Every structure is written in structure tokens, then in C-alpha cells.
Amino acid sequence: MPSERRILFLASYAPSLERPRAYNILHGLVRHFRVTLIAQARSESDRAAIERLSACCESVEAVPLSRARSLANCLRYLLTPTPLRAAYFSNPAMHRAIARRLSAQRCDLIHVEHMMAARFALPLRGVVRIFDSIDSIARLQEKIARISRTPLDRLISLAELPKVRRYEPWLCRQFDAVLASTRADCAALQAPNARVVPNGVDLEFFKVDATDGIEAGEEVLFYGRLSYAANREALRFLLYEIWPRVRTVRPAATLRIVGPSPPRMAAHAIENGVVVIGRVDDVRPYVRRARAVVCPVLFAVGTQNKILEPMAMGVPVVATPEAVAEMAAQPDRDLLIAADAESFARQVVRLLDDAALRRLIARNARAYVQTHHDWRVIVDSLADFYFALLAQHT
């Protein structure tokens, strides 16, 4: 049974399987606390996702945020020191919803998810405030500005980088504690009160099926939020440089692309064995069909859920060194790693060809995730930390 302590969980998006960190932390915290969720909804599907969480939360509220308001926010804050990531989700209705909740019910701790929602907690006093930064946005913007091949992404990052470098450390200092998914992100936040809370996997949801990928056809899977700059660049690298090399050796191989907002370049590759699926409610059937899941990201922060989830399901992964830089996984034991297009294609072909290798990596991958990335263990530890903080502030 949860304690009588209450947490107000604030997010600028609907916690869901597409946003697994918020979703799993929320689901874990309800085992220990009475949790109220207030989150912004930009669509009917967002609102429905938030309402579904009423099954586990003490109460939930979906606060509408229109695209028109978000665009107006960007124009309003364009010439100010506030980064666009923080400004985009500014919403007086969110402040009003929080005020109503706090006037109606005691709250012991506020958990705020990401820079996008952090400003909603800034005026609140007399309560323990936690900022889950997840990643360092300054670190991400630096990588986009340096590595991205998309001129618009580089331009925006170069413009935003000075703002984020000032704003992010200041923002962290406003909270009692700051969370980040890796040690590198904690260091980049420049916050002495930062603490690593790694990304994890729901091991009951993403579980091994005896038939997962081991004896499947020559299918390869790439998935993720395809509107995200790092995923777009990874997909470009995959479609134009890696996949043609795979098809030269394995002309029957199929690449499936799963995720919301697939770019037009994906559709242009259909004649090369590429199948564009788009958004799905459940990625697991596509993971199960794959002999390999690929993650060829060229820049990244945090830990990639699109690596952890297939590993938990016992499906082999091929990734770039950048994608696994913050993981303890061992190459050729837990997954395969390749830095350039030629070697990446070669590793994919190895998995397509070698059933024994697939079985070895499948077994080790699951064991690795069980040891290092079990959400239940991670959130139980976070809850202990929250109880300790509350005791200090009593």
C-alpha cells in the first residue's frame, strides 16, 4: 500500500509508452505515494492517454495546449534569455490547474518532468521540488550543432545553445534535487544536487518470447520518435549509407521503420526493401518479427530506450558507439557495435546469417537489462530517496 505522502507529478506531455521514462516513473511512484498527475494535452490521443492513467493515480487532469499558443510562445520568447524548449509549453491554464489542486489538497513533493514543464514549479514554495531533467539539453544542442547534417537543425541549435548553457544550470539550482539518466548528463547540468536515475525497462511488458526474431525472416527494425532530430539523422544514415550495403549482400532483406512522423525520405526507399509502418500503439509485435533492431544514431544523450527494449525482449541490437556510450553493455556479448556504414552493414548481415550468434546475444542482452535497467528496482530506489528528502524537510 502507498504511504499517505502525496506527489504532484507535472509533465508537458502525456506520459505513455512513447514517453517511457515519465510513464514508468509515474507507475513506479504510485506503489509508494499517492500521486496526482497534471499534464498538458496537445491532441485527443494525448488527452486519452492522460485519462487512462486515472486507473493508477489518485487523480489526473489534462490541460489543453494548442499549437497556436505554442507558436505564439516561440515568437514571444524568441528574443529573451528563455530557451524555446522551455518557452514552447508556457501555458497559464497549467498554472491555474496546479493552483487549484494545491488549494484543494496537501502536496508533499512535486516531481517535474523535463525542462519543458520545469517552469510550472518555479513559483511554488513550501514543498520539496524535484526536477527530472532526463538529459542535458545543452549537451544535446552542442551535438546537434556539431554533427547534424540538417542545416535548419544546426541553425536552431547554434541560436539556442548560448541560452541553454545559461538557463539549464540556473534552472537546476531552483530545485531541491535534480535527476538525469546518465553520469555524463549529470556532469553537464553543473548541478551539485544532481543524481543519476537511469532509464529502464518494464521487464514484464517487454519480455522474451521463445520465437522472438531467432528464426524470423530477414527482417530488420528501426523505431523511435522520428520527429526527433537524432532519430532523423540516424534514419538518413541508415537509408542512404548502411541499408544499400546490406541489400547488396542480402537482396531479400526487409527494413521496417516504425514510429510517428516518418520523414519523406523513408517513403522514397520503398523499392529498396523498406517498409514504412509509421506510428503504432504497441511496438512489440514488430520487435518480435525482427532478426535485428538497429540504432545507428550519430549523436545522442541519455540512454536509448530503443536499445533497451529489444534487448529486454531478447532481440539482438546493432548500434553505434555513440548510442551505447552511457551503457555498461559489452560488444559481441550483449549487442553488436559498429561506427561506420560499412562495418554497421557487416554486423547486420552477421545477425541475419548466424542463428547461434543471435541466440547468444539474445540471452546475454536480456540478462544485461535485468541487471542494470529494471524499472521496478530503479523507481524503488528513487522512492527511498524521496522519503529521505521528505524526512529532511519535515
Image: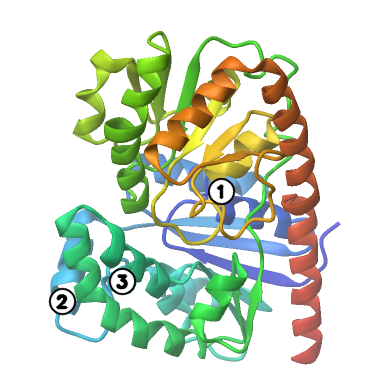
Query: Closer to the observer: label 1 or label 2?
Result: 1
| Contact, mark 3 vs mark 2 (Cβ under 8 Å) | yes
32 sits to left or right of 97: right
Q: Residue at x 27, y 56 (%)?
A: 148
Quadrant for the C terminus, please: bottom right
Q: Earlier in the sequence, mark 1 or mark 2?
A: 1
Residue ranking furthest to the right? 1
Local secondary structure at mark 3: loop
Residue type (three-letter) at the residue carrying disc 3: Ser
Q: Residue at x 60, y 48 (%)?
A: 54
Quarter of the image where one finds residue 337: top right
User: Relative to 14, does residue 115 appear above or below in the rendering?
Assistant: below
Marking on residue 76:
2
Residue type (three-letter) at the residue carrying disc 2: Arg
Residue 392 can be seen, yes or no: yes
269 sits to left or right of 251: left
Residue type (three-letter) at the residue carrying disc 1: Pro
- Marks 3 and 2, how far apart at CA: 10 Å
Local secondary structure at mark 1: helix
User: Where's residue 115, x and y in %?
Assistant: 42, 72
Q: Residues within 10 Å of mark 3 (few under 14, many from 20)?
A: many
- Marks 1 and 2, how far apart at CA: 31 Å
Q: Residues within 10 Å of mark 1 (few under 14, many from 20)?
A: some
72 sits to left or right of 287: left
User: Relative to 196, does residue 362 appear above or below in the rendering?
Assistant: above
| Contact, mark 1 vs mark 3 (Cβ under 8 Å) | no
Circle 3 residue: 90
Q: Residue at x 68, y 31 (%)?
A: 313
Query: Closer to the observer: label 1 or label 3?
Result: 1
Marking on residue 20:
1
Q: Earlier in the sequence, mark 3 or mark 2?
A: 2
Local secondary structure at mark 2: helix
